[in-house]
Image (cartoon, helix red, strand yellow):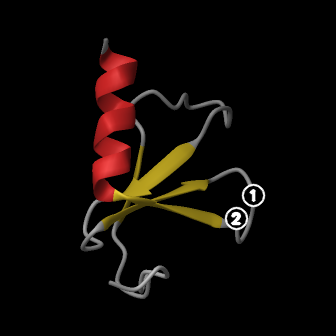
Amino acid sequence: MSTTPDLSTASWRTSSHSNGDGGECVQVADNVPGFVPVRDTKLANSPVLPFRAPVWAAFVQSVKR
């Protein structure tokens, strides 16, 4: 598996925990096989952090606990 996901067709969604005032704006793309890319929407052309799907799932589960 490649370590750099193809983001050309990424479908980004804003986190439900982001507020409407421009703060804490995090987006994730759920349609990238094997990865969950994350970016900051406050910065134009923000760098993307591509987390492997199992790592992201473990992170989310830990936050929920």
Determine whether 16 is above or below 62 in the image: below
Query: In this figure, which residue is indicated by the disc labeled 2?
Result: 46
Q: Are marks 2 and 1 in contact (CB under 8 Å)?
A: yes
Q: Residue at x 48, y 51 (%)?
A: 27
Amino acid type, mark 2: Ser
Q: In the image, 34: left or right of 20?
A: left
Quarter of the image with the N terminus is bottom left
Q: Residue at x 42, y 81 (%)?
A: 5
The quarter of the picture where residue 25 lies is top right
Dot 2: few (<14), some (14–19), or many (≥20) neighbours within 10 Å? few
Q: Residue at x 33, y 69 (%)?
A: 11
Query: In this figure, which residue is indicated by the disc labeled 1?
Result: 43
Figure label count: 2
Determine whether 24 is above or below 7 in the image: above
Q: Residue furthest right?
A: 43
Residue 7 image offset from top left, x and y in percent:
44, 81
Q: Residue furthest top?
A: 65
Residue 46 image offset from top left, x and y in percent:
70, 64
Q: Residue at x 55, y 28 (%)?
A: 19
Is 55 or 45 nearer to us in this picture?
Answer: 55
Residue 43 image offset from top left, x and y in percent:
75, 57
Helix, strand or loop under label 1? loop
